[in-house]
Amino acid sequence: MTATVEVSGSYDGRLKRFHGAGALGADGQDEDQDPLFELADGATLKNVILGAPAADGVHCLGSCTLQNVWWEDVGEDAATFKGGSASATYRVLGGGARHADDKVFQHNGAGTVTIGNFQVADFGKLYRSCGNCDTQYERHVVISDVKVTGPGNAIAGINANYGDTATLSGVTINGDGGRDITVCDRFQGNDSGDEPNETGSGPDGTHCRYSTSDVTYS
């Protein structure tokens, strides 16, 4: 692919593999890369394999559904959620991602991300509420029935000062070093572009919503 595919309605890739070329041929962490797929508000992308290089993966401009989407080698991010409405809903149903140097799912807009029945391996953070975007929002994520294989840094990173929440259940962490992966990190987000400070981790009943029984190690 040498140009971003713009999706409105539903796009079924029938499990074909897509990868970037030309202007979309990067696989690093440079900001402001273009995505392979850009989804309009309410669009669905399903049955797609994103190979390497994957540029900036998928951008959702509003509510979207990513169903059975697989990232073989995450570029900058696997998917970025950008909708500006607090009622926006972004659903990741099935699929998986691996080899993410930093974030898998980047939440820059408002609303709620739901990640269910997903697999992730060799990653930085599975989900991150943007820590230093120019415009900040209250954001929420619900993560359930997710299989995690290290190495990894954290499953969720949220900004407590903006009222973010992460609700987790049915998380299974596999492999050596699994207990080094934090489940939920809290940050002091900002809109100045500065690197946000981490303020805590683990369940607190307010922002990081889960109990130890919601996470198993194998």
Image (tube, grey):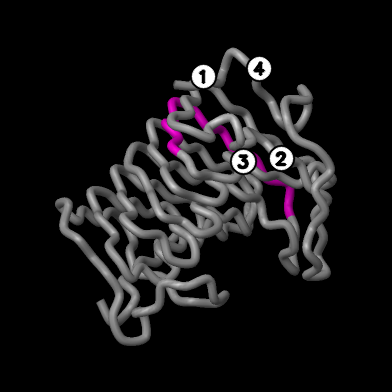
Task: Tell whether position 141 is magenta.
Answer: yes
Mark 2 or mark 3: whose residue is earlier in sequence: 3
Write down the residue under mark 1: 216
Percent position of residue 37, x then y: 35, 66
Are there few (<14), some (14-19), or many (20+) residues within 10 Å of tag 1? some
Write down the residue under mark 2: 185
The reply, left or right, for residue 139 in relation to residue 112 is right
Quadrant location of the C terminus? top left
Proximity of marks 2 and 3: CB atoms separated by less than 8 Å? yes
* Front: mark 1 or 3: 1
Are there few (<14), some (14-19), or many (20+) residues within 10 Å of tag 2? many
Q: For the point 80% across and 48% down, which residue is it? A: 198
Proximity of marks 1 and 2: CB atoms separated by less than 8 Å? no
Which kind of residue does numbered mark 1 sit on?
Thr
The reply, left or right, for residue 41 in relation to residue 71 is right
Proximity of marks 4 and 2: CB atoms separated by less than 8 Å? no
For the record, the magenta segment spans 137-149
Percent position of residue 4, x then y: 34, 75
Write down the residue under mark 3: 156
Task: Tell whether position 154 is magenta.
Answer: no
Which kind of residue does numbered mark 4 sit on?
Ser
